[in-house]
Amino acid sequence: MAHIRLLVRPLAAVTALSAGLVLLTGCGDGSGTSGASGRAASGPVVVATSTWEAALAKAAGAKNVTSIVPASIRHAPDYDLKPSDLTAVAGADYVLYASFEPWAGRIKEAAGSKAKLVEVNLDNTPAAAKAEVTKLGAKFGTERAAAKWNARFTTEWNALAQQVKATWPGGKAPAVAAQMFTTWAAKLAGAKTVGTYGPEAVTPAQLSALSAKKPQYVLENANMSAGTVLPGSGAKQLDIVNYPGKDLDLLAVYRKAAGQMEKAFSGS
C-alpha cells in the first residue's frame, strides 16, 4: 500500500448535507420495518461504514445490516458521503466503523442519530475475526448465532488450509512477501513469510531488502494496492481482497484467497 488516504469533510459540510433530511428521518428507520414491533422481529438496525464491518455484524447474528460504502469501492476511506447515507444512519441502533474511517462519527453527529457508535477491528486473522464476532454478538444479544458462526469459521479455515497445502510447489511451503494486511492469507497457506511491507509507502531500500530474500510470491493488498511490488524479481504477485462483496459473506473472502493461492501454487 502506498498510503492511507482519508477524506474527512468539515462537520459544517456534512451537516449541510443533512439539512434537507429532517422530514425523511422522521418517516422510518431505514430498515424496511417500522416501529418497535419491526425492530423486535428483526433485531437491531445496524449500519456499517463498509462491507467489512457489515459482514462481521452479519456473522455475529445481526439480520438488519446495511453498509454505507458500496462493495464496488475498493478503498473505503476514499468514499464521498451522500445525503442518503445520513438518512440510513438516522434510523440505526448501531453504527460500526474502523479507526481509519474517522468520518463515521461525523456521519452520526450530522444525522442526529442516537445510535451507539462501535469501533471494529478490521483484521482477517482468525483470532481477530472471531473476537470481533463474539464482541458484536454480545452487543446485539445474538451470542448463540455468533458462536455458531465462529465454529463454522474454524471448520472452514482448517479445510481451506489443507486444500492450499496440498498444492505447495514441490510439496514445500512457499516463500512469500506479504503486505501487513494480507499476512492472514500467508497464514492460511501455511507459507513461509520471508518479509512484510506497508502499510506505509514502500521505500527503495525496503524493496531491495525484500527482493534479496527471494520470495516466490507476493501477497499484495488489492484494497490498497501499490501496483507491482517487486518488479523484475520473478516473484508472482497475488492481489488479495480483504473486503467482502455485497452479499456480506466474510467466509467468501477466505475462499477466494485460498482459490487464488491454490491456482498459483499448482502452476495452473
Image (tube, grey):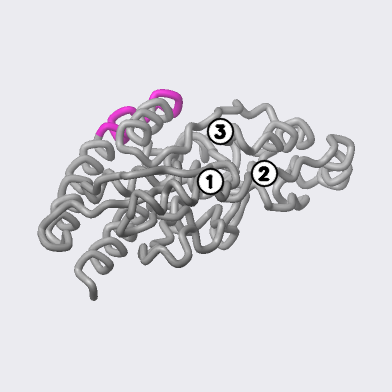
Q: Quadrant of residue 91?
A: top right
Tag 2 residue:
28
Q: Which of 223 and 267 is in front in this view?
A: 267
The three-letter code of the residue at mark 2 reads: Gly
User: Tag 2 or tag 3, which sits nearer the N-term?
Assistant: 2
Horizontal and vertical percent for residue 238?
39, 62
Classed neighbour count for the residue bearing mark 2: other residues with Cα under 10 Å, few (<14), some (14–19), many (≥20): some
Instruction: Give the CA distance from mark 1 to mark 3.
Output: 59 Å
Q: Is residue 227 magenta?
A: no
Q: Rate crowding at label 1 as few (under 14), some (14 to 19) or many (20 or more) other CA atoms within 10 Å.
A: few
Q: What element carries label 2?
A: loop
Quarter of the image for residue 163 reads bottom left
Q: Do the residues labelled 2 and 1 touch (CB within 8 Å)?
A: no
Q: Which element carries disc 1, helix, strand or loop?
A: helix
Inter-mark Cα distance, 2 to 1? 56 Å
> Residue 172 at x, y = what percent?
14, 54
- Label 1 amino acid? Ala
Instruction: Indicate left or right for 121 with 60 as reference.
Output: right
Q: What's the residue type where badge 3 is placed? A: Ala
Q: Is residue 264 visible?
A: yes
Residue that carries the numbered disc 3 in the rendered image: 36
Segment tinted magenta in the rendering: 138-147
Where residue 65 sits in the image (x, y, percent)?
Answer: 50, 45
Is residue 166 shown left or right of residue 61? left
Residue at numbered disc 1: 205
